[in-house]
Image (cartoon, rainbow, N blue to C red):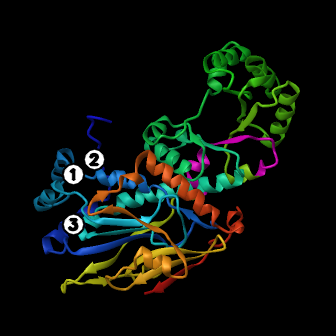
Amino acid sequence: MTGVTPASTALLTDRYELTMIDAALANGTAHRRSVFEVFARRLPAGRRYGVVAGTGRLLEAIADFRFREPELTWLSENNVVSPATLEYLANYTFSGSITGYAEGELYFPGSPLLVVDSTFADGVILETLALSILNYDSAVAAAASRMSGAAAGRPCLEMGSRRAQEQAAVAAARAAVVAGFAGTSNLEAGRRYGLHTIGTAAHAFTLLHDDEPAAFAAQVATLGASTTLLVDTYDVEQGVINAVAAGGAELGAVRLDSGDLPTMAREVRDQLDALGAVNTQIVVSSDLDEYAIAALAVAPVDSYGVGTSVVTGSGAPTCGMVYKLVLREGNDGELHAVAKKSAGGKSSVGGRKIAGRRIEKGLATEEVVLLSPDADIPTLHQVAEVNELRPLHVELVRNGVVRSEFTGTEGVRRATARHAASLAELPRAAMRLSAGDAAIPTEVVTV
């Protein structure tokens, strides 16, 4: 908004990010060149693929990651860091470079989703911000993608704002649209990202009036016959009669929000046709998830309104992504691979990485991660040359400058298109809702 200073995102982080910088500034290691990497060690149980989402939001947050007077004063008053570090933070802007999977792209275990090349201080301070955005948005997108697939071409509509924290609701709406949803009820998401917004009336509007016909007549008078009337406040059969009486044969749609949806949808379809409203659509809601949507596949349903399940990741509310240092500058001035050697499956792989997807006859068969154990990085051109791999990494930030085409409305448009194209490459078995392994294997190749 013109003339309005964006809110700082600088304190959307964990204390230890700043205390690490404090100690590193004190001993002279803060400005060592470092490379950090975001990846997921595994997919949520039973899932066959993940979806990268939130990249555009992260880039927007990095642009607003500034320590202004209120943030610096609070840090000082609470003795979080030393005066020298406060001075460093007062002048902080991210000056490094970031590459990563294009938003909307599918990912698999071990995929190097984001690569941050900067000084240690510049990069480590973004860890919590990056993970909080990518873990949540990607969880929502993965759930939304499964739901869109189960809907088999019928539109899914995001209606989960009342089941999420208010800012998470905006993020969820955006992520759901990236992964195939046709619209959202959230107005701030519509304003901020150019999303199609939907919604007409709840049961309260019907209950406000003396009777259902009066409520429907008022809604049609204001919103037109193309509106959607909620017909299950009282008796569904009578509700359909009242809806058609109010909107006529050209009534846009009726919505069912309770009951045995497959049976009710068939009965309502027969009733609408008998009343001459053959073009009136049926929208269903009521705690839908991908399994409920799949169960409605043979029912005469035209679109699905999804709330709680999509904004909570349908049972997988986070993706378990981590942010690890994989290269750092040594005393010799050269970059050296570093890795976490923890037990219990929490180790990491040091070295610079870039990824490509092997495509054979139009279908993805393998994720290939090219690994360089030192400073040398395979180029996108080299990725394309290795067994005809489709490059997966794109440049997101160069020397502190965010590529604006990946943010805002244009970012959502690009991400939505990327997701559809990426999903079309998967083998058909990857779309099953039953538990299974990752759709394609990941191979790490040292170059």
- x then y, percent, for residue 371: 43, 82
Q: Is residue 110 visible?
A: no
Q: Which residues are magenta?
A: 295-315
Q: Residue at x 53, y 51 (%)?
A: 178
Q: Residue at x 61, y 28 (%)?
A: 200
Whichever of labels 2 and 3 marks the residue nearer the N terminus, that label is 2
Whichever of labels 1 and 2 marks the residue nearer the N terminus, that label is 2
Secondary structure beneath label 1:
loop
The amino acid sitting under disc 2 is: Ser
- x then y, percent, for residue 86: 15, 57
Instruction: Measure how far apart labels 1 and 2 are at the Cα level.
Output: 7 Å
Q: Nearer the viewer, residue 379 or 206?
A: 379
- x then y, percent, for residue 351: 37, 81
Q: Is residue 183 magenta?
A: no
The quarter of the displayed image where residue 55 is located: bottom left
Asked if marks 1 and 2 touch (Cβ < 8 Å), the reply is: yes
Whichever of labels 3 and 1 marks the residue nearer the N terminus, that label is 3
Which numbered tag is attached to residue 8? 2
Does 432 sit above or below residue 8?
below
The amino acid sitting under disc 1 is: Phe
- x then y, percent, for residue 26: 13, 70
Secondary structure beneath label 2:
loop
The quarter of the displayed image where residue 166 is located: top left
Residue at label 1? Answer: 67
Residue at label 3? Answer: 21
Q: Residue at x 43, y 43 (%)?
A: 167
Quadrant where the image shows the C terminus: bottom left
Instruction: Measure how far apart labels 3 and 1 are at the Cα level.
Output: 14 Å
